[in-house]
Image (cartoon, coloured by chain):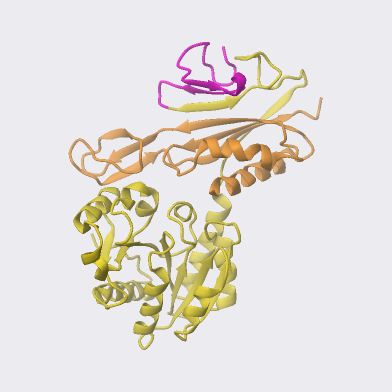
Amino acid sequence: MHEFGLTQTIVAIAAEHAGAARVRRISLAIGQLSAVLPDSIQFCFDVCSRGTVVEGAELQLVEIPGLARCRQCGHEFFLAEPFGVCECGSTHLEIIQGEELKITELELEDLCV
Amino acid sequence: MCVTCGCSDGAETTLTHLDGAEHHHHLPDGRVITHTHAPHAPAHHPSPASPSSQPSVTVHLEQDLLAKNNLIAAQNRGWLKGRQILALNLVSSPGSGKTTLLTRTLRDLRPEMQLSVIEGDQATANDAHRIQETGSPVVQINTGTGCHLEAAMVERGLDALNPPLNSVVLIENVGNLVCPALFDLGEFAKVVILSVTEGEDKPIKYPHMFRASQVMILTKIDLLPYVQFDVEHCLAYARQVNPNLQIFQVSATTGTGLEDWYDWLRQAQQSIGKGMELIAKS
């Protein structure tokens, strides 16, 4: 369950940026080839955020599909798993998308108003 | 229309649950968006995510969740490189024979190279005691409930171990084929260990680990006559996931195949000594 540790990281990063403000929304990009289960992040989020400025925030998860480029012929195609076979028969693939694991955006309460 | 992701009612929504509070949208470019709306709002597509009228600010971050671990791993890598130390991250499921392979390797190579060990387990110092019996320096890291080693733990382990210049540090990760694939420790290479008493399809069941590794060691091959394990299938699966994988077949009990693994270790250590990048033999 590495998702629990990652969710703790998400809450810590958001709280650090928020300071005294409350966090309304956290947007995450999670690649479908990143070995992280979005459902587990969602599950851990309530527990990890309890008692912090992140509590009650909306968690928006954007799953990024896996995309590979064949090292042999340059063809690009979608991957559901971190391996596959190109139409040219090659298994030498470079994963160019789908391994993302990041916070893209935070929406914070505006304290200046 | 949903303000958060721009979808319209009924369009490409594949799953709705939690009383409509959490739902998924599949976008034409393949992205899947999951989000919740405020629980007291109408079931689907209320106005913006923030129910209160108070204004909000949006901060663009693009912050990698593993950045902190990756930074410490890079520091470890520099620390090791400066001392010309070869560090390997040994990963496998529990019971693959990692510690047996390790103690045999330590005993056989002790006359020609200095080796030390960082042992990662959730609990007990049993493995560290087994390593200690070989006469090699060892530190034990117990992760408690943690399912993998992280770079910061290895940093502390290296501090405590203080390995000599031009030596080899073998890091035995927690037995787990999932999580350790994500966490760089600063090692030169990941070595994934698979035994013939496991399923031959493990490389495609746990592709992240086999893809992240540069070396695979198939252990317990002395048991092949007694188990149903198709070596050729297993190797084909492994190469499908990672065509560049360097594969060794060994028995740490009888010693079969160990010399090839030792040769790879010697070459890797020499390449570190020369400050060269070793590319696993294609």
Q: Main secondary structure of the magenta part?
A: loop
The residue nearer to you, when weighing B273 against A3, is: A3
Which residues lie in the magenta part? B1-30
Rendered colour, chain A = orange
Residue B160 location, x and y as percent? 59, 76
Q: On the picture, is A84 further left or further right than B6?
A: left
* Residue farthest to the bottom, as pictured: B111
- Is residue A79 placed above or below B68 in the rendered structure? above
Residue drawn at 51 percent across, 26 percent down:
B33
Which quadrant does the N terminus of chain B fall into? Answer: top right
Residue drawn at 29 percent across, 50 percent down:
B201
Residue B232 location, x and y as percent? 19, 56
* Residue farthest to the front, as pictured: B226
Which of the 4 image quadrants contains residue A102?
Answer: top right
Residue B280 location, x and y as percent? 29, 62
**Looking at the image, can residue B164 be seen?**
no
- Is residue A85 placed above or below B197 in the rendered structure? above
Residue B260 location, x and y as percent? 25, 73
Which of the 4 image quadrants contains residue B22?
Answer: top right
Rendered colour, chain B = yellow
The residue nearer to you, when weighing B14 against A86, is: B14
Circle count: 0
Q: On the picture, is B248 further left or further right than A34?
A: left
Which of the 4 image quadrants contains residue B51?
Answer: top right
Which quadrant does the C terminus of chain B fall into? Answer: bottom left
**Looking at the image, can residue B257 be seen?**
yes
**Magenta span contains residue A49:** no
Residue drawn at 58 percent across, 62 percent down:
B143
- Is residue B185 placed above or below B256 in the rendered structure? above
The residue nearer to you, when weighing B231 against A7, is: B231
**Magenta span contains residue B10:** yes
